Image (spheres, rainbow, N blue to C red):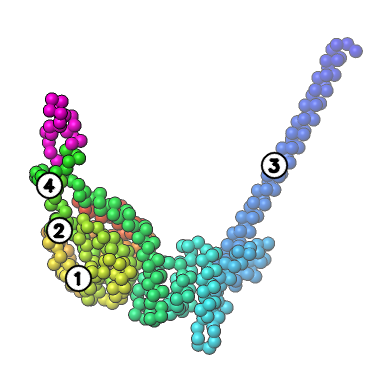
Amino acid sequence: MDKNSTNHTEKVDQNTEDLNKDDKDRDNQNRDNQNRDDQNKDDQNKDDREKIRRWRLILGQESENRFSQMGNAKLSEEQDLMDQALSVIYNRGDGGFKNRGAGKGPSDPQISRWLGDVRTLFDKEIVTIIQSDAINRCGLKQLMFEPELLEHLEPDVSLASTLLMLKEQIPKSSKESVRIFIRKIVDQINRLLEQDLKRAVTSAINKRRHSPIPSAVALDYKTTISRNLKHYNKDLGMIVPEHFYFFDRTSSSSANKWNIILDVDQSGSMGESVIYSSIIACILASMTSLTTRIVGFDTNIIDLTDKCEDPVDLLFGFQLGGGTDINRSVAYCEQFITNPSKTLFFLISDLDEGGNRAGLLRRLEEMKSSGVTVVSLLALADGGKPYYDARMASKVAGLGIPCFACSPQMLPRLIERALKGQEISEREFEVK
């Protein structure tokens, strides 16, 4: 065989090998694509089945037959437990707790077990919603006072507000359990706010600021030495200061301390605001650089300043519910304003005034004109659109007084701004 024939044969063999390789590559690619398509279909089917399961949980046991016709979307074991827990309060037919006997209401141990299941199966935010619905739908309000049940309830500000509103109905045997439950809420909020609030106040009221008035007892040795090191005299072997620094002693005197007054509406709609206001008042009252006063009002006025050592005692001092006479309460608070330029006045109310509206507006305007920093907080609450008298709020804002609902987490920054004399922007602080 000549050389050309040999080369031709080799080329043919090579081309055949290349074609076979290409065929194999295509086959492998097709298999990969098919596997990927199958996997995508499986994933899609799983997603669809999970969506069906979720809708089944949302619509309840009554929808079981209809969903069973949509394919294999049976609830998982955990979802089945969720379904049973939810059916107790949301099913229209067989829902609700089973009675102990005629007219005796639901079984306490049964409810305790149910509450334990709910806390195990759902996130904390969902638990508080389910608890609230159980109380409202299933008539469990009286059972909230049962010590065994309170131990299983997830601490929640709204629930604590309900307990405080019904405090006169709490039996003696349950009073301590209710206080322990309220204490859990107080501790949670304290952990959330205390450090930020104290840091904000300390930043705004710098005890170590300096005064141009010389005083031997107020000499700031550390600052004087550090800033005059460059004036060290080698011949004398000592620093010869060119400028001395003195602490401002007047800022620590009672007449020159900042005075913070919280005038808190204790009508039924303000329950959560009362809880946050009380805890904030206690934190502020613990700071010696301030004087703090807290007043509660409906149609009557109660000065609760002497209870600021313990936020739980302070909370139980409020009487939630009743009408509203804001003007009268603001008039009461005016007597504690001795240095207007050092007074921060918070009116915490939905402004649903049942008293003298024109008198209230005139009083707030005069207070602001005298030099008091006035802030009207329509609510202190986490999220949700609060109820308030929009017309009255508009008139208060028209006086140049900041007027908005504020998240408790934003209050430390708000107080710092106010104490520093900076502008308070509604857009920055209001509840979204």
How many circles with numbers are drawn on the protein? 4
> What kind of residue is marked 1?
Ser
Which of label 3 and label 2 is nearer to you?
2
- Distance in Å between CA atoms under marks 3 and 4: 86 Å
The residue at which mark 1 appears reads as 329
| Residue neighbourhood size for the residue with mark 4, other residues' Cα within 10 Å, grouped as few (<14), some (14–19), many (≥20) | few
Which residue is at a point 55% across and 64% down the rendered structure image? 121
Find the magenta span and give its range: 225-246
| Residue neighbourhood size for the residue with mark 2, other residues' Cα within 10 Å, grouped as few (<14), some (14–19), many (≥20) | few
Mark 3 and mark 1 residues within 8 Å of each other at the beta carbon: no
User: At numbered mark 1, what does the secondary structure look like: helix, strand or loop?
Assistant: helix
Q: Which mark is residue 68?
A: none
Is 77 on the left-hand or right-hand side of 161? right
- Distance in Å between CA atoms under marks 4 and 1: 43 Å
The quarter of the image holding the C terminus is: bottom left
Q: Is residue 267 something one can see in this rendering?
A: no
Is 410 on the left-hand or right-hand side of 302? right
